[in-house]
Image (cartoon, helix red, strand yellow):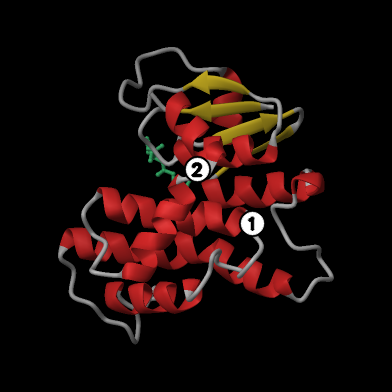
Amino acid sequence: MKLFWCPQTRSTRALWLLEEAGVDYERVLIDIRDASKPRDPDFAKASPMGKVPAIADGEAMLADSAAIAMYVADKYPQAKLAPAVDDPARAQYYWWMIFTPGVIEPAMAEKFSGAEPNPLSHAWGSFDLMIETFEKGVGDGPWILGDQFSAADIMVGSSACFLKQFDMLPDSKTLEAYAKRCMARPAYQRAGDLNG
Ligand SMILES: N[C@@H](CCC(=O)N[C@@H](CS)C(=O)NCC(=O)O)C(=O)O
């Protein structure tokens, strides 16, 4: 499997994922900050928007950290990164897998840009509602699905770390502690070392 990545981007999620999954992969650098540098021709096929992360796994090619997380978790069930399809926990797993691209990231953009919150019509609710929902979801944890760590933690856990890194995490003992638990995972640390 080829992972198209670039340091200090959302590729960190895919690195963390592949390290948790214990999958053999090759990192292929895409310098998103310099479009004049040559790019592996598979990258354009895997990522129609030219964004990282993306993967090429034989003929299977896709981009987007959430899509990649779902693909890898299902393709490598031995890594136990997703509840089985017939496990009732699968329902909450889907909800939290989509929470980062559907809610956390747009809510962060709202906050960053200073846009007026409009929870009734904005699909992500609002930044404050996102934090409240995220906090309740983590609850006593330790993970977003309770005792079982899953790819959903890679999605929302990395988002908690980004919120912290961008100084956007409000005073929340629950989310602070959750972010710390994620960062303490050996696979997260290996991904950090690879990320430069
Ligand atoms: N929803 C995507 C977003 C990916 C994304 O926006 N990646 C940025 C870096 S963090 C990128 O590749 N930007 C370069 C560009 O748009 O040209 C994901 O979660 O993977």
Identify the secondary structure beneath mark 1: loop
Q: Which residue is mark 1?
A: 150
Query: Label 1 is placed on what type of residue?
Result: Ser
Residue identified by numbered label 2: 13
Locate residue 78, reporting x and y percent.
81, 46
Looking at the rendered image, the disc whose residue lies closer to the viewer, 1 or 2, is: 1
Q: Residue furthest top?
A: 38
Tag 2: amino acid: Arg
Do the numbered discs 1 and 2 sit on residues whose CB atoms are within 8 Å? no
The residue depicted at 75 percent of the width and 45 percent of the height is 79
Q: Secondary structure at mark 2?
A: helix
Residue 83 location (% of width, % of height): 75, 63
- To which quarter of the image does residue 146 belong? bottom right
Left or right of residue 18: residue 137 = left
Q: Residues within 10 Å of mark 1 (few under 14, many from 20)?
A: many
State the residue in front, 52 or 181: 181
Question: Which callout, 1 or 2, points at the residue further toward the start of the chain?
Answer: 2
